[in-house]
Image (cartoon, rainbow, N blue to C red):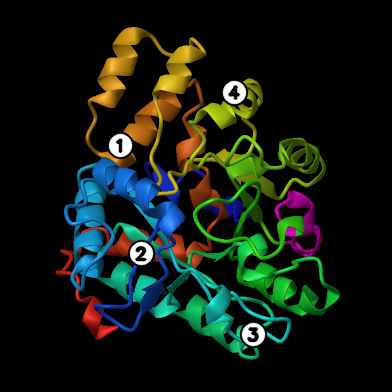
Amino acid sequence: MNSTNSGLGLGPIDVHVHLSLNGQGSLSGWSRRRWVMRPFLAAAAHDIGLRGGFAGRDFDERYLNRLVGWLEDSSLSAAVLLAYDWVRDSYGFPRKDLSDLYVSNEAVIAIARRHPKFLPGVSIHPGRPDAFDELERCAAQGAALLKLLPCVQNVDCNESRYKPFWERLAKLGLPLLAHTGGEFCVRSIRNDLKTPACLRLPLECGVTVIAAHCGTRALPWDGDHFQTFLEMRSRYPNFYGDLSPLSHITHLVSLERLREDPARLLHGTDYPVVSAVFPSFLKGWISREELHRLNAIGNPLEKKIQLTRAQGFPEQVFTDLWRLLPETVVRSFQQRGSRIPGPPDLLAF
């Protein structure tokens, strides 16, 4: 933890916002839209106001413009925009046949340069032959954190051969945001890597680890790793959880426990994943008036902030991330805050 970043006076920050690129408009990303995801993508497109949906040669530009608009119109000071490495084999080479998404590190770094409210969250499989070189390059370019999906990208973080990588990550002061729990949007390659227990080695190497989704279910029949999350949070002071996108029926039991003990939790949306308000009304956490008010908020980034407050979480969940980021990243963010952003230019990546 970078304790010198405390008391910065910076506002809310979203730790978990996805960039999506379909590969038709640039070489910076790629996606495979599985048929089973079509109704969920349609719902997400409606929720985020994405006209034209998740298809078309102009998708990359439409998606980014819509996201920038929501961010500028929200009470967020910043959002971490996430890259997405390929699924890789045991030697670290890409397996496009097993991948559903790819977003380059250069894409999120370039967008963050043009839009001051974005911080780049890079994605580097530690088994890549160039893993160390890419980590150093991204850190020098202002990376805020490293994002991995162990169960999807085939990363067993506890493998001893990755220890030097985690030690270097810790020395650079870059947190690791790692998916834990159920996964539905993309295919899982290793179901055994959904548990937060697969993150012990990075923690023991001194990395600040943020367990995305706190090990909770995505679907009712998913394995639930929430208890493991709680046990590890008690054991490791450098272990955190994010609240993305915890709002659905499957999350209510876990949310109730987290409301009672909100230690080391961080705000996140998992944008463009839809936030659900009605389950919190069912639990009695919000009134009918609050239900209608929150559902009337068109901005999905702002809706999740206000829903999290209405659920009873303390204000520090929105700002504690600033204390965990590298000091150079925070200083750079403060210095560039007055810069006027230029238009997106994804084709230039």
Image: magenta residue range: 193-206
Horizontal relation, residue 272 to residue 220: left or right: left
Horizontal relation, residue 343 to residue 137: left or right: left
Amino acid under disc 4? Arg
Q: Name the disc covering residue 20, or none.
A: 2
Q: Distance between the residues labelled 4 and 3?
A: 39 Å
Q: State which mark lies toward you, 2 or 4.
A: 2
Q: Determine the residue positioned at 37% across, 53% down.
A: 38
Q: Nearer the viewer, residue 47 or 341?
A: 47
Q: Determine the residue positioned at 38% across, 76% down.
A: 29
Q: Name the residue under label 3.
A: 128
Which quadrant holds the C terminus?
bottom left
Amino acid under disc 3? Arg
Q: State which mark lies toward you, 3 or 1.
A: 3
Disc with the residue nearer the chain's start (4 vs 3): 3
Q: Distance between the residues labelled 2 and 1?
A: 20 Å
Q: Name the disc covering residue 302, or none.
A: 1
Q: Name the residue under label 4.
A: 259
Disc with the residue nearer the chain's start (2 vs 1): 2
Q: Main secondary structure of the magenta part?
A: helix
Disc with the residue nearer the chain's start (4 vs 1): 4
